[in-house]
């Protein structure tokens, strides 16, 4: 375990590879932890010549929890935001993006490639827009633009997102809920066994169980709203990756993200749901690694 103080909080992180290589920071999605990255993905990216950094977002894993704020009433926040009300939340996506910059500062990393999934993709978008001078490139993976006109996810997938945490009050209940959610978000062409899902669910529960933190992260996403105007001002090299079979965030959201980032590369992956299964690692490592290398070899442009 390695923790540092950055941006006024404690951030748990891990590194792999040589610090002399170009830095690549991966940003997790809603309620997940750094241990949820497949090890074979990290090792492939290290082998490709990157200094890999993974970390726990605030309110997840071993990083600082904002427990004093309590759980957020997500349905109420959504209703109020849709009605145009100004909602109060414990922190913003901009704060979560600033955590990444704080981590870079603490590790003395001047510039880095960043790639984020789902909520992490939204954080990566904010980084590219607000802190572009610190980024070599950005990859937004299975994330949307926040555009309210894009299609919603499937009813079953949306129901898993709205889980209130009542089914997670016991160890077995939390583990069961984790597995059931993973099944709903699964990738048809990149399967994960139920045994492997349970192993990760147990490991995640024992390392950190913080369902209230997940609601606070959701609140930050809701508050952030439509990022399309922000995306249009991004000037660094970007790529957008999305699963054709994503049941939670419709691929139209990924297409909208790419359409609004000037010059963005777009990659649709058949058979990918809303997860990062180990079986996907060769594909994902190739997309992220090759794009970042192209940018570096072209001196900061996409060759």
Image (cartoon, rainbow, N blue to C red):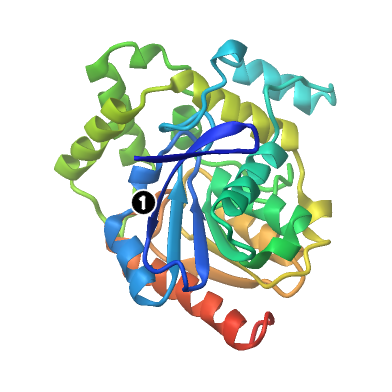
User: SS at mark 1?
Assistant: loop
- At a point 46% along the width and 31% down the height, the residue shown is 60
Where 59 falls versus 273 (above or below)?
above
Q: Quadrant of residue 68?
A: top right
Residue at x 36% of width, y 34% of height: 181
The picture places residue 29, in percent across and down from the top left corner, at 50, 43
Residue 202 percent location from the top left of the image: 23, 31
Q: Is residue 130 above or below residue 60?
A: below
**Dividing the image into 4 quarters, which one contains the N terminus?**
top left
| Quarter of the rendering occupied by the C terminus | bottom right
Q: How many marks?
A: 1
Is 51 in front, or is 154? 51
Q: Residue at x 56, y 84 (%)?
A: 294
Looking at the image, is 122 positioned above or below residue 233?
above
* Residue 232 horizontal side relative to residue 95, left or right: right
Q: Is residue 141 visible?
A: no
Residue drawn at 34 percent across, 11 percent down: 169
Left or right: 209 as drawn, with respect to 53 = left
Residue 225, how many percent across, how many down? 75, 38
Tell me: 133 left or right of 177. right
Task: List the residue tagged with mark 1.
Answer: 37
Left or right: 217, with 33 as reference point? right
Is residue 243 something one can see in this rendering?
yes
Q: Position of residue 20 (x, y in %)?
A: 47, 72
């Amino acid at each position: 375990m390695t923790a540092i103080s950055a941006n006024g909080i404690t951030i748990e992180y891990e590194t792999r590879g040589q610090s002399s290589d170009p830095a690549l920071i991966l940003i997790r999605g809603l309620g997940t932890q750094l241990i949820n990255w497949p090890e074979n993905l990290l090792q492939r990216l290290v082998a490709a010549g990157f200094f890999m950094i993974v970390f726990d977002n605030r309110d997840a894993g071993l990083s600082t929890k904002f427990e004093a704020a309590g759980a957020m009433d997500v349905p109420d926040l959504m209703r109020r935001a849709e009605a145009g009300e100004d909602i109060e939340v414990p922190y913003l996506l901009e704060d979560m993006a600033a955590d990444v910059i704080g981590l870079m500062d603490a590790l003395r990393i001047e510039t880095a490639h960043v790639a984020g999934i789902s909520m992490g993709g939204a954080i990566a978008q904010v980084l590219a827009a607000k802190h572009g001078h610190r980024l070599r490139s950005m990859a937004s993976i299975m994330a949307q633009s926040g555009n309210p006109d894009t299609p919603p996810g499937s009813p079953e997938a949306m129901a898993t997102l709205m889980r209130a945490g009542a089914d997670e009050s016991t160890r077995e209940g939390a583990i069961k809920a984790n597995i059931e959610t993973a099944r709903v978000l699964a990738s048809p062409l990149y399967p994960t066994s139920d045994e492997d899902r349970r192993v990760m669910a147990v490991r995640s529960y024992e390392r950190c169980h913080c369902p209230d933190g997940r609601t606070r992260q959701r609140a930050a996403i809701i508050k952030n709203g439509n990022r399309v105007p922000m995306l249009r001002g991004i000037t660094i090299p970007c790529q957008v990756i999305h699963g054709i079979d994503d049941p939670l965030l419709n691929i139209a959201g990924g297409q909208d993200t790419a359409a609004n980032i000037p010059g963005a590369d777009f990659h649709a992956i058949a058979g990918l749901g809303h997860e990062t299964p180990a079986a996907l690692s060769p594909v994902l490592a190739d997309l992220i690694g090759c794009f970042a290398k192209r940018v570096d070899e072209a001196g900061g442009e996409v060759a």
